[in-house]
Amino acid sequence: MANPELAIIPQHVAIIMDGNGRWANKRGLPRTVGHSKGVEAVRETVRAAGAVGVKYLTLFAFSSENWGRPEAEVNDLLGLLRRFIRRDLAELHRENIRIRVIGERENLRGDILPLLVEAEETTRFNTALTLVIAFNYGARDEIARAVAKLARDVEAGRLKASDIDADRISQSLDTAGIPDPDLIIRTSGEERLSNFLLWQAAYSELVFLPDYWPDFDRNLFYDALRVFASRDRRFGGLSNKAAAAVVG
Ligand code: IPE
Ligand code: IPE
Ligand code: MG
């Protein structure tokens, strides 16, 4: 099936775009070529998501741990993000795509933060797909910042400790207002979350693909949507079939 029209379309898909370096290595190319090819895959994925009515697409672009890579590679990744925003912002805006950025914003050097803020501001009233860019993002850092904010609110008397519940924590995360991901896809064969959306992933369906990110395309995306549609989400309850059997 080229197009998953009949499948259940997840409202929110989040992707751990992994394997750029190995894609390049396999071809005897420098890692940077893999990262550049990865941007092409991003463009195709955004289009493919919009075309089938996905409302939120979150892409893990750079983790808080990725600063530990060699400086040249870090600069390369930052440069690609910069270029992506500069080149693609106008088109994303034309396509009615809203951009949101999650991750720690303090201490970002240079022009990256102003660029990200410009992308958010320019597109803030757009209503088609919301493209969530996870940049300088780590879930433990996100949760720690949310907890610190709630603690400050309690200290200042704005909030009672007994009012802190799961919803209030969700609304204090960078993803406030964004529904939890229904589907998380990771490419490259690794089967781990690597500090991505740990709180929000509580009931996400996970799909791990062997393909490296630069090879990701519309077809692989729609294959993953079909796998998602075939899953039986129970959220701790009973599946529809099992519930019917209990009633019957
Ligand atoms: C994903 O590819 C891009 C980022 C993590 C920024 P990698 O650079 O992690 O590629 P591999 O995993 O080393 O192949
Ligand atoms: C996760 O990939 C981060 C991004 C895709 C941006 P990594 O390549 O950094 O994860 P590990 O190191 O394999 O867990
Ligand atoms: Mg990797």
Image (cartoon, helix red, strand yellow):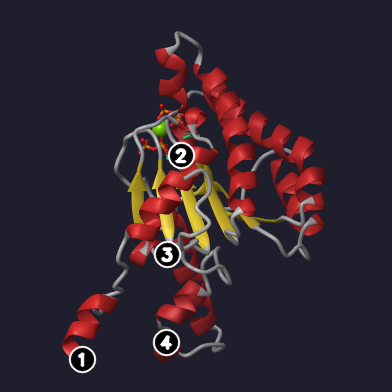
Residue at coordinates 64% horizontally, 53% vertically from top-left? 50
Judging depth in this view, the residue of 111 and 189 nearest the camera is 189
Q: Specify which label sits upstream in the sequence, 3 or 4.
A: 4
Mark 2 or 3: in front is 2
Give amino acid for label 2: Leu
Q: Which mark is residue 247?
A: 1
Q: Is residue 39 above or below residue 63?
A: above
Task: State if disc 1 and disc 4 touch (CB < 8 Å).
Answer: no
Return the x and y of residue 18 as percentages of the image width and height: 43, 35
Front residue (pair 116, 48): 48
Q: Is mark 4 within 8 Å of ligand 2?
A: no
Return the mark for residue 220. 2
Disc nearest the viewer among 4 and 1: 1
Image quarter for ligand 1 equals top left
Pointer 2: residues within 10 angstroms few (<14), some, or many (20+)?
Answer: some
User: Do the residues under discs 3 and 1 have CB atoms within 8 angstroms?
Assistant: no
Mark 4 and mark 1: Cα distance apart in space: 41 Å
What whole-number distance in Å separates the C-alpha atoms at marks 2 and 1? Answer: 39 Å
The residue labelled by disc 3 is: 200
Which badge, 3 or 1, comes first in the chain's sequence? 3
- Residue at disc 1, secondary structure: helix
